[in-house]
Amino acid sequence: MSLTSPDIARLANLARLELEPAESARLLTQMNDFFSIVEKMRSVDTSGIAPLAHPVAAIADIALRLREDRVSEPNQREANQRNAPAVEHGLFLVPKVIE
């Protein structure tokens, strides 16, 4: 897959970016370089290879040291919301930011 200048212009428009021609050309090169790396990675046959849970598992047999999932802090919702300008049903109320 290879991008073209119109593709970069469309992506910039969707991202609400104003790109200079030099920036657009540089971005086109960088994006195409990225996609070429992805294509190389996709061409590698990984059938029969089990996914790793941790990158070190490829070198040594490791066991993850996970702590017990338990509550360690008391519920302080009321104390935390005491200084809030607006609260309703235990939730912070904020101004609408979507147009």
Image (tube, grey):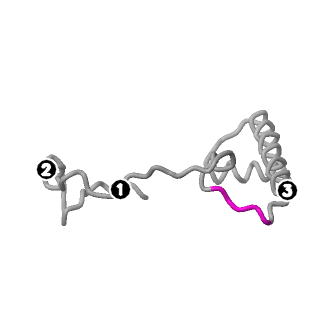
- In the image: residue 59, left or right of residue 94: right
Q: Earlier in the sequence, mark 1 or mark 2?
A: 1
Q: Which residues are magenta?
A: 48-52
82 versus 19 height, above or below:
below
For residue 79, the mark is 2
- Residue type highlighted by circle 1: Glu
Instruction: Let me know if residue 45 is in the magenta part.
Output: no
For mark 2, give the secondary structure: helix
Residue that badge 3 annotates = 44
Q: Earlier in the sequence, mark 1 or mark 3?
A: 3
For residue 68, the mark is 1
How far is disc 1 from disc 3 in space, using C-alphas? 39 Å
- Residue type highlighted by circle 3: Val
Residue at image location 86% in from the left, 57% down from the top: 43
- Residue type highlighted by circle 2: Ala
Image quarter where the N terminus lies is bottom right
Q: Position of residue 3 (x, y in %)?
A: 82, 51
Residue at image location 85% in from the left, 60% down from the top: 45
Q: Position of residue 54 (x, y in %)?
A: 60, 51
